C-alpha cells in the first residue's frame, strides 16, 4: 500500500496532513498503537522539517510485510552539518518558526528515536532526502 | 480528574461544544510542539499557551484528550473547527500554566513521561 504527499515549504496550516492521514489509515488497518505512535511522530517531524526549512517536498509512504517505509525528498537549503542536526537542542529554525512552538532542535532526534532504520542524504543548496523504516510484527 | 471537575476548578470555558466527560489521568505542560510530540502521554491534558492550529495536529497525533489554553489564550475559528473535527476538547482558563498544572496535580492528574 502506497501513499504520496506533496509538502509545501512555509505552509504551516497544512503541516501534519500526511501524518494524520497515515495515522487514520494505520488505525483502520489495526496496527498496534505503539507502532502507529512511532510512525505518526516520525512522519510529523519530517513534515515539519520540510515546512520549516525547505521550499517544497514529497513524502512517500509504503507498507510492506513487517515494515513501514517513508521517504521524504525536498528541494531546499540542505543540511551543512548532519551530525549537528541530529544533536538534541540544535536548531536553525527562524524566530517566526520558533514563535509557533517549533525549532526545539528535537525533529531529527525524535525521528531517530522512533524508527528502526534511518538514512539521510543531503546536498547544500539543493535539498535533502530522508528515509526511515519502522518494523512491526 | 473528570473534564467537568476541570471546568469547575479552573473556571474553564469549553470552546468545542459538547464533550464526553472522560477521566483524564495524565497531564503535560509545554509550549514546544516537538517536545509535546516526543513526550506527551496519550489520553492526557495538554496545558499550553500555543493557540494555533498546529497544536491540534500534534494533539491528534498524540491522542491528547483535552488542550487547556492558559492565560486566557484564544484560538482562532479555524483552530476550533479543526479541533471539533478531530474530537479534541479545547478549554480556556484565565489561570497560568503553572497554576493550572498545580490544580490538576492536586486532583490526581499525574505526569507520565513517555
Image (cartoon, coloured by chain):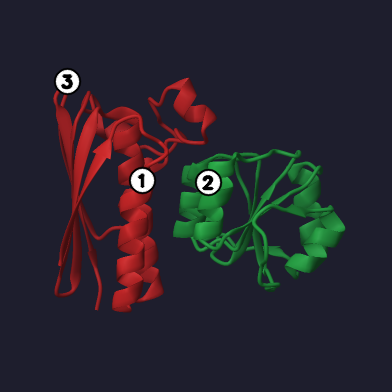
Query: In the displayed structure, does residue B66 sit left or right of residue B2?
Result: left
Colour chosen for chain B: green
Q: Chain of mark 3?
A: A
Q: Which mark is residue A45?
A: 1
How far is disc 2 from disc 1 in space, using C-alphas?
13 Å
Instruction: Chain letter for mark 2, please.
Output: B
Give the mark, 3 or 1, whose residue is nearer the N terminus.
Answer: 1
From what the image shows, is residue B57 above or below residue B31? below
Specify the quadrant that holds the N terminus of chain B: bottom right
Do we see residue A116 in this rendering?
yes
Question: Which residue is found at the position 79% from the left and 53% from the top?
Answer: B12
Q: Are marks 2 and 3 on the same chain?
A: no
Identify the residue position indicated by label 2 in the image: B55
Q: Is residue A113 left or right of residue A64?
A: right
Judged from the image, the secondary structure of the residue bearing numbered disc 2 is helix
Q: Are marks 3 and 1 in contact (CB under 8 Å)?
A: no
Q: Secondary structure at mark 1?
A: helix
Q: Which residue position holds label 3?
A: A125
- Give the Cα distance between marks 3 and 1: 21 Å
Chain drawn red, letter?
A
Report the mark closest to the observer, 2 or 3: 2
Q: Quadrant of residue A72?
A: top left
Amino acid at each position: 500500500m502506497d501513499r504520496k504527499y506533496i509538502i509545501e515549504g512555509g505552509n504551516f496550516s497544512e503541516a501534519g496532513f500526511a501524518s494524520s492521514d497515515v495515522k487514520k489509515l494505520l488505525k483502520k488497518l489495526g496496527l498496534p498503537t505503539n507502532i502507529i505512535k512511532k510512525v505518526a511522530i516520525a512522519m510529523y517531524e519530517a513534515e515539519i522539517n520540510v515546512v520549516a526549512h525547505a521550499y517544497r517536498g514529497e513524502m512517500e509512504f509504503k507498507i510492506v510485510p513487517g515494515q513501514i517505509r517513508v521517504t521524504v525528498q525536498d528541494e531546499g537549503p540542505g543540511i551543512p552539518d548532519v551530525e549537528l542536526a541530529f544533536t538534541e537542542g540544535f536548531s536553525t529554525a527562524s524566530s517566526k518558526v520558533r514563535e509557533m512552538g517549533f525549532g526545539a532542535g528535537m525533529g531529527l532526534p525524535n525521528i531517530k528515536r522512533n524508527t528502526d532504520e534511518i538514512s539521510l542524504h543531503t546536498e547544500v543548496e539543493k535539498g535533502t532526502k530522508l528515509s526511515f523504516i519502522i518494523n512491526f510484527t | 480528574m473528570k473534564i467537568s471537575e476541570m471546568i469547575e476548578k479552573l473556571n474553564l470555558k469549553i470552546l468545542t461544544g459538547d464533550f464526553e466527560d472522560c477521566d483524564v489521568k495524565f497531564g503535560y505542560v509545554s509550549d514546544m510542539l516537538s517536545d509535546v510530540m516526543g513526550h506527551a502521554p496519550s489520553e492526557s491534558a495538554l496545558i499550553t499557551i500555543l493557540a494555533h492550529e498546529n497544536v491540534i495536529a500534534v494533539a491528534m497525533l498524540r491522542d491528547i484528550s483535552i488542550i487547556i489554553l492558559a492565560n486566557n489564550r484564544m484560538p482562532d475559528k479555524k483552530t476550533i473547527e479543526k479541533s471539533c473535527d478531530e474530537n479534541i476538547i479545547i478549554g480556556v482558563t484565565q489561570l497560568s500554566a503553572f497554576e493550572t498544572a498545580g490544580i490538576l496535580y492536586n486532583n490526581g492528574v499525574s505526569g507520565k513521561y513517555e
